[in-house]
């Protein structure tokens, strides 16, 4: 587990995150559980970005099924078995299988069935955490085009001339990598009839090493879901414009709004969510580059009313850690409880948080 002493100095304004590293070891389970909370809600709201696209590949521009990407996992009814291989930590590989299904109307289920390879002897705890992280797994873990305009602006792609076959589905093979500061190359097999990603691999550009591979082993369109417990939103959720008075009124406090992005090409999605969690209102914002996502949540601390915090709350205590390819952050600062997660570095999360306190 990393601690915030690695971050850049945020300055003296409001004593934002001074002394944040004290007493943070042993909180891995708490931070891992945070991924379950950040995944709750409706997923990235449609941003309707007007970003110009990249140079066009082919006379007709990007394939039509790219536009299906943001909604395909929720509008496609299916059931299947997926094999998940995660090699982000070469010393701690993780390979398991999961049973996944969608009713095509927004509800889904992801159940981890068995662990094939793991360096963690506590399989029971892993399976429990996987159950709590269903929404995060389904909405945010896998490669997916989430905002077409931003994706076309930030990523280069090539569609292979020869189709592939994944679990009996004929797919287009698409090679993708970020146009600026790329660290990974993705090989993605997409069902062109639904836009659903059937398989994807992530390779480290510097070493060529395989970092992740997730693929359907079986796939049944309109498969039987009668023995699955389907979910959509765990908590009551409402959608508002980030910079509107209605958003602030619904929250009952002034939310933290990031001014900096976690990486090249990211933008703050202009729609945000208000989640009601155990009677408390949480603001949930999204930052995305069209494929990757960073989630930013905050709630006012008890008795702070969103006003000036006491000395200990001004001082702040924030923990960060790496979970596979994700970084997670949780803590208190400036009278707010904050939870963040994304496929970005720990330093990126701290930078975004710091920018929201200016």
Image (cartoon, grey):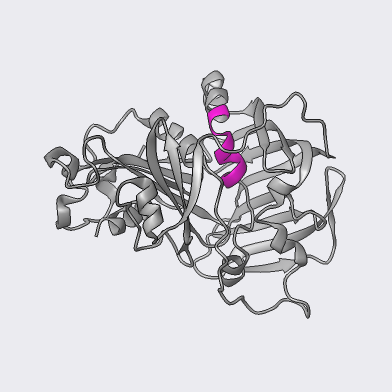
Q: Visible in this render: residue 322?
A: yes
Frontmost residue, 75 versus 6: 75
Frontmost residue, 274 versus 61: 274
Residue 178, compared with residue 37, is above or below; it is below
| Most common secondary structure along the magenta stretch | helix
Image position of 37 (left or right of 72):
left
Quarter of the image where one finds residue 227 = top right
Residue 103: percent from the left, percent from the top?
74, 38
**Residue at (53% x, 29% y) in the render:** 132
**Residue at (76% x, 41% y) in the render:** 216
Residue 52: percent from the left, percent from the top?
58, 77
Q: Is residue 133 magenta?
A: yes
Image position of 355 (left or right of 34):
left
Residue 61, compared with residue 11, is above or below; it is below
Q: What residue range appears in magenta?
A: 131-140
Residue 339, compared with residue 263, is above or below; it is above
Image position of 320 (left or right of 91):
left
Image quarter in which the N terminus is found: top left
Residue 26, compared with residue 150, is above or below; it is above
**Residue at (65% x, 79% y) in the render:** 55
Q: Is residue 334 magenta?
A: no
Frontmost residue, 200 versus 283: 283
**Residue at (69% x, 31% y) in the render:** 97
């Amino acid at each position: 587990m990393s601690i915030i002493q690695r971050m850049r100095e945020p300055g003296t304004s409001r004593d934002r995150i001074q002394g944040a590293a004290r007493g943070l070891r042993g909180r891995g389970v708490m931070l891992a559980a945070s991924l379950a909370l950040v995944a709750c809600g409706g997923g990235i709201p449609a941003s309707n970005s007007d970003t110009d696209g990249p140079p066009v590949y082919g006379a007709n521009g990007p394939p039509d099924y790219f536009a299906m990407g943001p909604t395909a996992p929720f509008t496609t009814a299916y059931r299947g078995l997926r094999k998940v291989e995660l090699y982000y930590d070469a010393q701690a590989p993780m390979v398991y299988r999961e049973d996944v299904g969608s009713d095509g109307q927004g509800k889904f289920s992801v159940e981890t069935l068995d662990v094939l390879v793991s360096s963690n002897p506590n399989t029971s705890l892993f399976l429990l955490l996987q159950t709590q992280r269903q929404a995060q797994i389904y909405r945010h873990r896998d490669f997916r085009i989430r905002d077409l305009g931003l994706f076309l602006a930030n990523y280069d792609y090539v569609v292979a001339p020869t189709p592939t076959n994944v679990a009996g589905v004929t797919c287009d093979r698409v090679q993708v990598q970020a146009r600026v500061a790329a660290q990974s190359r993705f090989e993605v097999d997409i069902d062109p009839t639904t836009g659903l990603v059937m398989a994807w691999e992530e390779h480290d550009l510097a070493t060529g090493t395989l970092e992740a591979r997730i693929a359907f082993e079986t796939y049944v369109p309109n498969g039987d879901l009668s023995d699955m417990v389907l979910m959509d939103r765990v908590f009551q959720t409402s959608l508002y414009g980030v910079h509107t008075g209605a958003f602030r009124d619904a929250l009952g406090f002034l939310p933290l709004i990031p001014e900096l992005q976690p990486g090249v090409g990211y933008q703050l999605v202009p729609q945000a969510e208000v989640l009601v969690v155990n009677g408390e209102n949480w603001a949930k914002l999204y930052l995305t580059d069209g494929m990757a996502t960073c989630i930013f949540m905050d709630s006012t601390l008890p008795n702070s009313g969103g006003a000036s915090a006491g000395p200990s709350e001004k001082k702040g205590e924030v923990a960060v850690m790496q979970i596979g390819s994700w970084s997670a952050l949780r803590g208190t600062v400036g009278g707010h409880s904050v939870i963040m997660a994304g496929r970005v570095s720990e330093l990126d999360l701290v930078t975004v948080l710091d920018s929201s306190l200016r």
